[in-house]
């Protein structure tokens, strides 16, 4: 009888631990709450956007790549991280469209070894996009922002490329 009670107690304890772990992971995987009252306006609404470059996204299942093309008359400088197999990785900002305005999505902080990128007029580079939102993004309209310096003054500028989140997946926007 004692052995049966010990086995039941052990089974109950394991079930409680397993339930706690499942609850924790479900809580962690919940979508990020994007309340415009708690978010900062995006950079372009503070005047940092630029026509000096074009940013485009190529979204495929499980992967998002960016291409940045220098459209200006002078050099464009930026940075990326070195990935496996000589692949470049690009981090940047994520903005969400809420109530007709773009807001910055909170990002987790991370550090990586970087490489400098210098583009002459007309040149471009490609990199895999690495997003670091604090939690999963809820369905909605988003854009990736990527910063660089350009022209003789080398002021910081930002370009944007749209993407959507539909059923938890990154997709090209319709249209």
Image: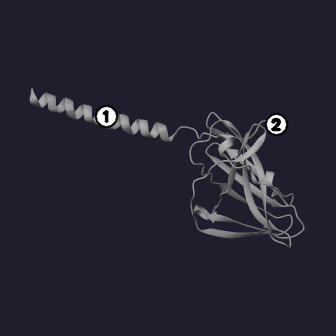
Under tag 1, what secondary structure? Answer: helix
Q: Is residue 98 left or right of residue 52?
A: left
Which residue is the extreme one toward the left? 1
Q: Nearer the viewer, residue 122 or 4?
A: 4
Q: Nearer the viewer, residue 161 or 124?
A: 161
- Write the residue at 80% across / 58% down: 48
Q: Earlier in the sequence, mark 1 or mark 2?
A: 1
Quadrant of the drawing holding the C terminus: top right
Q: Is residue 76 left or right of residue 9?
A: right
Q: Nearer the viewer, residue 14 or 106?
A: 106
Which x, y percent locates residue 34?
Answer: 64, 40
Q: Are marks 1 and 2 in contact (CB under 8 Å)?
A: no
Q: Is residue 2 left or right of residue 15?
A: left
- Write the residue at 87% across / 70% down: 74
Callout 2: 10 Å neighbours few (<14), some, many (20+)? few
Which residue is the extreme one toward the right? 73
- Write the residue at 78% across / 36% down: 174
Image depth: mark 1 or mark 2 in front: 1
Which x, y percent locates residue 16?
Answer: 31, 34
The mark found on residue 175 in the picture is: 2
Q: For the residues marked 1 and 2, what is the alpha-carbon distance in whole angstroms? A: 49 Å
Q: Is residue 92 left or right of residue 18?
A: right
Under tag 2, what secondary structure? Answer: loop
The mark found on residue 16 in the picture is: 1
Quadrant of the drawing holding the N terminus: top left
Which x, y percent locates residue 99?
Answer: 75, 37
Callout 1: 10 Å neighbours few (<14), some, many (20+)? few
Q: Please tell me how many numbered marks the rendered image carries.
A: 2
**In which quarter of the view is residue 157 placed?**
bottom right
């Amino acid at each position: 009888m004692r052995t049966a009670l010990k086995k039941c107690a052990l089974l109950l304890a394991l079930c409680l631990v397993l339930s706690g772990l499942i609850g924790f992971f479900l809580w962690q995987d919940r979508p990020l709450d994007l309340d415009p009252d708690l978010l900062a306006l995006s950079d372009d609404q503070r005047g940092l956007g630029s026509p000096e470059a074009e940013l485009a996204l190529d979204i495929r299942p499980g992967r998002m790549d960016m291409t940045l093309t220098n459209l200006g008359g002078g050099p464009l400088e930026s940075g990326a991280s070195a990935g496996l197999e000589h692949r470049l990785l690009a981090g940047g900002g994520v903005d969400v469209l809420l109530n007709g305005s773009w807001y910055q999505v909170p990002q987790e902080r991370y550090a990586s070894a970087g490489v400098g990128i210098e583009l002459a007029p007309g040149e471009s580079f490609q990199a895999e996009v690495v997003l670091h939102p604090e939690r999963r993004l809820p369905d909605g309209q988003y854009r990736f922002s990527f910063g660089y310096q350009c022209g003789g003054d080398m002021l910081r500028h930002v370009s944007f490329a749209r993407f959507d989140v539909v059923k938890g997946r990154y997709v090209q926007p319709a249209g």
